[in-house]
Amino acid sequence: MQARIPALMLGTSPFIGAAQFGRKAYEYRKTFFYNESNMEKLFIKSAALDVKAVQLIVYAPLVKALKAAEKEMDEKFFIAAVITSGRKFEKDLNLIKPLKPEIVAIHALFCDALDDRINGWIKKIRDMGASPAASTHYPGEAIAEMDKAGFDFDVYLAPVNTVGYAMEPDYESTLKALETTDKQVIAIKPLAAGSLKPTESLFKFIYRYAASISVGITSEEEMEETYSVAKRVI
């Protein structure tokens, strides 16, 4: 089974206060991770704007917030879940299972290292009825290495933007890898941790290399602006 991926997804890196946001990271974590109702509101707003897809980092507060949003709306999101733990992989898989994710991705920490547990994890993901995916922080090399290794992934999650932010080891090798692979790609970090403005030219560029764009959002106003720009080029 290979999931058909929506062209636009709500990203959740701000909800965990990811380090890429620098000084804002702690404020984001305090606002969202420790306040599930704020995440729930943005999930509901996203659905109201007809983006019913989320790239969900698997932590209990985020899972609970999405469950609450789905119950409130009586609708289901398309979910591309990312499991960040190796030690707690099965526990996190069971945590996300009730939400019936279409895609479950293994974190870049393990994929970039070609961890010897990957094949076992892929089987568990498929047994759950989801498409397995690999997240990478080193797409310019890791995508080709994973393709060569023959891992049974359907999807890659990789940084893609116009300035080369987080596109390691470099911009050119990342774009080449994205053009060469036959896997579907979900672009992450499209706004380079908030340093880029959402523009039509930016989204058009990214869609040349990716089937979907996952963009982190921290307010309803930001969501309305970003989604309206993206939808003009989808």
Image (spheres, grey):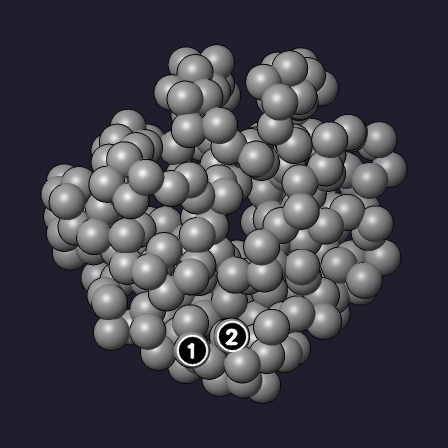
Q: CA distance from mark 2 to mark 1?
A: 5 Å
Q: Along the horizontal axis of the image, is 96 left or right of 118?
A: left
Q: Along the horizontal axis of the image, is 67 left or right of 214?
A: left
Image coords of residue 55 (percent x, y): 46, 46
Residue that badge 1 annotates:
228
Residue flagged by tag 1: what amino acid is it? Ser
Callout 1 crowding tier (Cα within 10 Å): few <14, some 14–19, many ≥20:
some
Relative height, residue 121 to residue 3 (above, below) = above
Give the image quarter of residue 220. bottom left
Mark identifier at residue 231 = 2
Image coords of residue 170 (percent x, y): 66, 65
Which of 143/131 is in front? 131
Circle 1 SS class: helix
Image coords of residue 109 (percent x, y): 54, 35
Relative height, residue 191 to residue 32 (above, below) = below
Q: Is residue 164 visible?
A: no
Dot 2 and dot 1 residues touching (CB under 8 Å)? yes
Give the residue drawn at x 75%, y 59%. Answer: 178
